[in-house]
Amino acid sequence: MANIAATDRPGAKAPPSPQRRVDVLALGLVCAVMAAALALALVAEEAPRPRLSAQVYPASLAFHLGSPSAGGREAGLGWNQPSDIAVLGERWFVLDTGNDRILELNAVGAVVQVLDKRRDERLDLEAPMAIAGDGRYLYVANSGTAEVLVLTPDGGVVWTLAVGGDPLPARPIGLAVAANGDILVSDAANHRVSRYDAEGRLLWAVGGGRSGGREGFNTPGGLALDAAGNVYVVDILNGRVVKLSPEGSFLGQYGRLGDTAGTLSRPKDVAVDAAGNVYVSDSLLAAVQVFGPAGDFRGFIGLKDPADRGSGALFRAPAGLTIAGNELYVVDRFAGLFAMDLSAAE
């Protein structure tokens, strides 16, 4: 009774129960974890990238579009975490992933039209992650429905390719279209890259299950083709780009896992220019790494001022890459669309 009497005195506090002590400790642990995660996010977002100051690739900023402007009949529209771009002649189509739609932009960055299910009910985008064009049609890797949608530049769906998954439902996040109409798709869920003909028949598949070396992939992402038809696969969690023959045979790799110039931390997409140079976006290094045709490191793109090593990162989270003419288009999930002039690198 003495302890009870003590807590009854004015201003006295009862000792915390064991359960309350456990709850307080648990809450403190959760807060600590959240604080650490926030700190890491801030470091990743704001920290300079001094490791990348070794070798700058000769590319200059042609333009930067942080958000599309109002225009046409679809005025006042912005994007949310865009992921990729396709260029058809003078027409630009940006994959607005966060809003499940495609934005066509004109030469001054204004929205010309919005392509989504309002145009065609079959154009029901769910987390689309990649877009490509063959000069006639647009192709979209619709990861939420395990499909590739083929559509006209005005948003009409021509046909749909169902991407087979085994053992998990497919999650297509990378896409390339060959000159003969074959479609190449990377399946991040099953760690597989597949090639289909223009009628949707499976020609070959490489990988399946987490792997590395010559055997397969660990989360394949962006895809690209060179002039000879060789296939370049971003092997995200293995920190490299794998080169395959047109028949799917392993030919070599570019880069390796790391956090310095010439290595890759979290590669996303790949593009190949007419000379065979390979460009790889890296969201953690906030840069585009460049390799020669033989795999030699040529430099990186990603400083606000290429002549000033202390000028800071130009990109925040570079993802989709496309080369058209002398320009490399870089879609940044948080900073919008960049066009880099590559003419000085020739």
Image: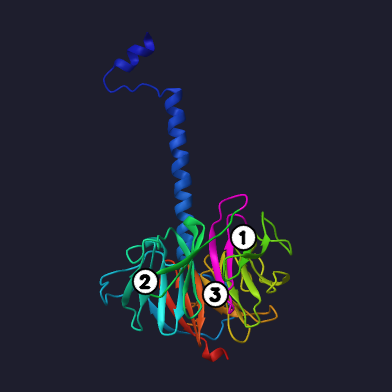
Q: Position of residue 128 (x, y in %)?
A: 46, 62
Q: Say if residue 43 shows up in the picture.
A: yes
Rounded to the nearest angstrom, the CA distance separating label 1 from label 2 is: 30 Å
On residue 103, the disc is 2
Residue furthest toward the top?
A: 1
Does residue 111 appear left or right of residue 239 in this picture?
left
Identify the image quadrant of residue 154: bottom left
Q: Is residue 125 above or below residue 179?
A: above
**Kind of residue sitting beneath label 2:** Leu
Q: Nearer the viewer, mark 2 or mark 3?
A: 2
Which of these two is toward me, 152 or 140?
Answer: 152
Label 1 crowding class (10 Å Cα cut-off): few <14, some 14-19, many 20+?
Answer: some
Label 3 crowding class (10 Å Cα cut-off): few <14, some 14-19, many 20+?
Answer: many
Residue furthest toward the front?
A: 199
Rounded to the nearest angstrom, the CA distance separating label 3 from label 1 is: 17 Å
Q: Which residue in the structure is indicated by mark 1?
A: 237
Q: Which residue in the structure is indicated by mark 3?
A: 288
Label 2 crowding class (10 Å Cα cut-off): few <14, some 14-19, many 20+?
Answer: many
User: Residue shown at 61%/60% (left/top)?
Assistant: 237
Q: Position of residue 217 (x, y in %)?
A: 66, 61
Does residue 70 appear left or right of residue 25 in this picture?
left
Q: Split into 4 quadrants, where in the image is the N terminus?
A: top left
Q: Say if residue 312 shows up in the picture.
A: no
Tell me which numbered mark, 1 or 2, is placed earlier along the sequence.
Answer: 2
**Kind of residue sitting beneath label 3:** Val
Q: Which residues are magenta?
A: 166-191
Tell me which numbered mark, 2 or 3, is placed earlier along the sequence.
Answer: 2
Q: Split into 4 quadrants, where in the image is the C terminus?
A: bottom right
Which SS class for mark 1? helix
**Kind of residue sitting beneath label 1:** Leu
Q: Position of residue 59 (x, y in %)?
A: 51, 85
